[in-house]
Amino acid sequence: MDDDKQGPYALKGGEGWTYDYHGIAFNVKAGELGAGGRAAFIEYTARHGEEPDDHTHRTEDEIFYVLEGAITFRCAGETFDLEAGGFIFLPRGMKHGYTVLGDHEVRLIVVTAPGGDAVESGWGGFISDVEASGELRSAPP
């Protein structure tokens, strides 16, 4: 779809397109599929034991912002301990992952954006996987 076709929209707290993907509820506020496609924005809760294996995104940069809880990110051989208010930028092409610290949940905001050649060709990143393969549980009114 053409970028010009997406008009403005607003979502209230808790609204968005909520997908169940690998047992985790991801609330997509702005997705990778459909109009726009310059950045995606999601909110979700991470729990100890549900962390993904270390992985690499070849087409997208990721930004995580910690709303609540404590988490350790790994990227390119370094570790970063973050708590509420913490921010991390994870460049595309670098292996990364995270570990939730303790038994407390971690609420995260994640922004992804295409980089390099993906800007022109579409990036098909993580959030598009959630949108395409996850089970849509709710949508905004």
Image (cartoon, rainbow, N blue to C red):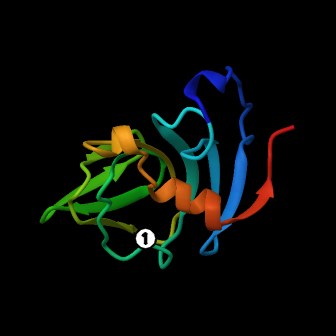
Quick one: which residue is furthest to the left in this view? 77
Q: Is residue 13 above or below residue 108?
A: above
Residue shown at 32% from the left, 52% from the top:
59
Residue 93 shows in this picture: yes
Q: Quadrant of the C terminus?
A: top right
Q: Which quadrant does the N terminus fall into?
A: top right
Q: Furthest residue to the right?
A: 141
Q: Quadrant of residue 111?
A: top left
The answer to whether residue 129 is above or below residue 115 is: below
Residue 64 visible in the snapshot: no
Q: Is residue 132 left or right of residue 89?
A: right
Q: Residue at x 51, y 41 (%)?
A: 40
Horizontal side of residue 17 vs 36, given as left or right: right
Label 1 packing within 10 angstroms: few (<14), some (14-19), many (20+) = few
Residue at the location (69% across, 60% down)?
19
Relative to residue 94, is residue 1 drawn left or right? Answer: right
Look at the picture and state if 119 lies above or below 23: above
Q: Identify residue type, mark 1.
A: Gly
Percent across and percent down for residue 56 are 29, 65
Circle 1 is placed at which residue position?
A: 102
Position of residue 12 measured from the top left corner of the image (x, y, whole percent): 74, 31
x and y, in percent, of residue 57 in the image:
32, 60
Nearer-the-camera pick, 4 or 141: 4
Which residue sits at x=46%, y=34%?
38
SS at mark 1 in the image: loop
x, y (%) of residue 109?
50, 45
Q: Count all numbered tags in the image, as a single digit.
A: 1
